[in-house]
Amino acid sequence: MADLKALSQAIIKGDQMTATKITQQAISEGVAPGTILEDGLIAGMNTIGVRFKANEVYIPEVLIAARAMKNAMAILEPKLVAAGVKPRGKALMGTVQGDLHDIGKNLVVMMLKGAGFEVMDAGVDVSPDAFVAKVRDSGAQVVGLSALLTTTMPSMEKTIAAIREAGLKAKVIIGGAPVTQEYANKIGADGYAPDAASAVDVAKSLLN
Ligand code: B1M
């Protein structure tokens, strides 16, 4: 019988082979795809998120866990779709105009996916208009803006203004090394997160 605790442990350790094997086994045994996702994959990524926030694990461990999750998801995704399992929410992530830093943004994407969100990655150097178009096309409920340069932080304000002016209801979360809660308040963001794991908590709370 497939052991979903062992599956979450495999994600935590970043053991791709075991994660893929147990996922496959659970599917063959008829375990509900949503249960495999929640009790195996998401449980593992949640633990990584908690440990990352507590500085018990670092970026390499998060990347390795995310890779194991991605491989297991490749097998599970068609089964989730077939079973009609809905994602926790839709999120759009991007680095704002003028800014090419994407390592932190990619971590946020991975963590959100790990938490069961459907995530569209808009990439880097994304203009306010491009954000608006992508929010509209994707129906994202949460938009994540990342900036690593003090000089590109004003792009966050412009993007939020453009989203609001377009009448879109999406909640906006901002983050990145120079960004603070005060700045988020000042520019009218709905949320601020200091790290990728906290971004998941903020996204979940904004959807509730
Ligand atoms: Co750049 N760079 N860089 N750089 N770079 C910094 C950011 C800098 C602090 C270095 C320094 O001077 N000490 C400095 C910014 C100074 C400032 O404005 N305060 C700087 C500069 C000046 C520049 C250039 C202007 C250099 C030049 O060309 N003269 C140039 C700008 C290019 C551009 O963007 N237009 C530039 C270029 C680059 C590279 C291309 C070489 C490369 C980027 C590669 C890439 O991303 N693919 C690069 C790198 C690697 C860095 C440093 C070394 C590392 C950044 C990083 O990836 N950190 C950085 C110095 C440093 O931080 N030590 C530096 C790891 C990453 C995981 O952390 O992105 O902060 P971070 O993400 C964190 C949190 O911030 C948060 O979660 C993550 C962790 O969980 N987070 C979010 C991030 N986004 C979030 C969104 C959220 C929530 C949380 O919600 C939506």
Image (cartoon, rainbow, N blue to C red):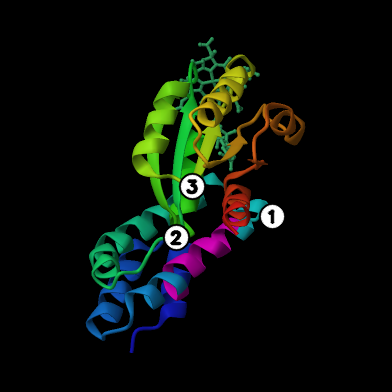
- Residue shown at 61% from the left, 18% from the top: 154
Give 156 or 45, whichever is nearer the viewer.
156
Identify the disc placed on residue 54.
1
Amino acid marked by disc 2: Gly
Q: Residue furthest bottom?
A: 1
Q: Residue at x 47, y 63 (%)?
A: 13
Give the magenta-colored segment's residue range.
39-49
Numbered circles on residues, count: 3
User: Which amino acid does the dot numbered 3 rest on?
Assistant: Gln
Q: Is residue 102 visible?
A: no
Q: Nearer the viewer, mark 3 or mark 1?
A: 3
Of badges 3 and 2, the one in the foreground is: 3
Labels 3 and 1: the sequence-earlier one: 1
Three-letter amino acid code at the position of disc 1: Ala
- Point out residue 6 in the picture as x, y percentages from the top left corner: 44, 77
Q: Is residue 42 magenta?
A: yes
Disc 3 residue: CB within 8 Å of ligand 1: no
Query: Disc 1 and disc 2: Cα gap in Å?
Result: 22 Å
Which structural element holds mark 3? loop
Q: Are marks 1 and 2 in contact (CB under 8 Å)?
A: no
Estimate the x, y position of residue 82 in percent, counting from the top left.
23, 70
Q: Position of residue 151 (x, y in %)?
A: 61, 14
Residue 59 higher or lower than 81, as above or below:
above
